[in-house]
């Protein structure tokens, strides 16, 4: 499943590196180059400049469109908003966290800014076209890319806390049945699931291109029943602490959040 999820970054990269090359090579004229060559260079330069400007505009438009789409769905951003609340609910467990979900680099970057926090990311989708920070996280082994439809590449109870956002919304029940128990297996203190509200977030065609399947947002009745079927128990203590901390700062999440105990 090699899909480029972010064509915009590719075009940005091209405009950064690819386009600067012709400019630098054309501006080394020999001392007595004929005038038509000079005019040719000017015209070529103008074309490149126009091309660059158009490309730049396209990139910006793409970025706005993508931002809007991500805004519709993204529980990743919700995880980042919820970090202070999660810290109060989970205390020490928040010092070693695994985040699972698309664009995990952004979540990991936020988590790593917290004091005494180690964080790792599992990215379910191809990340060819990502920024420098993300590449470094991958290079350092902090972020790994793995298809979460298969057994996760970690030993049991590897992380006190496992937080998953968005990723499960793209799995059919067949794969969900394999992946959710896996997430519970690799956590030792808790599993937190961030998932979209079905009525808030409407599926869009762009999703299929981005993630290889469309989003399937389920309501809380569905999730609750489903998690009971999997013999996963609610983490009542953490859930209550989370609610209290959220109330104090009038935080109301845009996503459904489930606090679960790991398998014992
Ligand atoms: C997934 O698991 C649920 C609950 O255990 C079960 O009812 C359902 O039939 C399973 N679905 C698939 C496709 O395996
Ligand atoms: C939740 O979703 C299920 C289908 O998955 C549906 O049958 C049920 O009516 C929904 N419940 C609410 C409260 O929306």
Image (cartoon, helix red, strand yellow):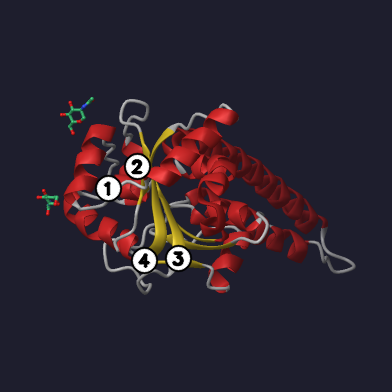
Q: Give me the C-alpha separation between circle 1 and circle 4.
A: 26 Å
Earlier along the polypeptide chain: callout 1 or callout 4? Answer: 4
Note whether 177 is above or below 51 in the view shown.
below
Depth check, mark 2 against mark 4: the one in front is: 4
Note whether 226 is above or below 108 in the view shown.
above
Depth check, mark 1 against mark 4: the one in front is: 4
Mark 2, secondary structure of its residue: helix
Confirm or reject: label 1 Cβ below 8 Å from ligand 1.
Answer: no
Q: Give me the C-alpha separation between circle 2 and circle 4.
A: 28 Å
The residue singled out by tag 1 in the image is: 213
The extreme right residue here reads 31
Earlier along the polypeptide chain: callout 2 or callout 3? Answer: 3
Is 230 left or right of 169, judged from the image as shown? Answer: left
User: Residue 207 — which label?
Assistant: 2
Tell me, yes or no, if residue 100 can be seen here: no
Q: Position of residue 98 (x, y in %)?
A: 47, 61
Confirm or reject: label 3 Cβ below 8 Å from ligand 1.
Answer: no
Residues packed near mark 1 inside 10 Å, few (<14), some (14 to 19) or many (20 plus):
some
Q: Are dots 3 and 4 in contact, CB under 8 Å?
A: yes
């Amino acid at each position: 499943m090699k899909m480029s999820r972010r064509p915009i970054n590719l075009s940005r990269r091209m405009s950064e590196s690819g386009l600067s090359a012709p400019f630098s090579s054309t501006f080394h004229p020999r001392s007595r180059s004929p005038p038509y060559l000079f005019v040719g260079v000017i015209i070529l330069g103008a074309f490149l400049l126009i091309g660059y400007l158009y490309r730049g505009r396209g990139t910006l438009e793409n970025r706005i469109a993508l931002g809007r789409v991500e805004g519709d769905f993204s529980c990743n951003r919700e995880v980042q908003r919820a970090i202070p609340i999660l810290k109060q609910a989970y205390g020490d467990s928040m010092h070693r966290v695994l985040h699972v979900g698309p664009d995990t680099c952004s979540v990991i970057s936020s988590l790593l800014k917290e004091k005494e926090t180690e964080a790792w990311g599992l990215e379910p989708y191809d990340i060819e076209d990502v920024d420098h920070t993300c590449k470094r996280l991958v290079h350092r082994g902090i972020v790994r890319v793995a298809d979460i439809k298969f057994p996760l590449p970690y030993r049991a109870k590897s992380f006190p806390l496992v937080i998953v956002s968005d990723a499960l919304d793209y799995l059919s029940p067949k794969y969900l049945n394999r992946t959710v128990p896996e997430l519970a297996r690799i956590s030792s203190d808790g599993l937190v699931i961030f998932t979209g509200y079905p009525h808030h977030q409407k599926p869009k065609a762009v999703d299929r291109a981005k993630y290889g399947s469309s989003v399937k947002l389920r309501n809380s009745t569905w999730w609750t029943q489903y998690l009971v079927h999997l013999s996963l128990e609610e983490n009542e203590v953490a859930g209550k602490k989370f609610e209290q901390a959220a109330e104090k700062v009038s935080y109301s999440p845009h996503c459904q959040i489930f606090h679960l105990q790991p398998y014992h």
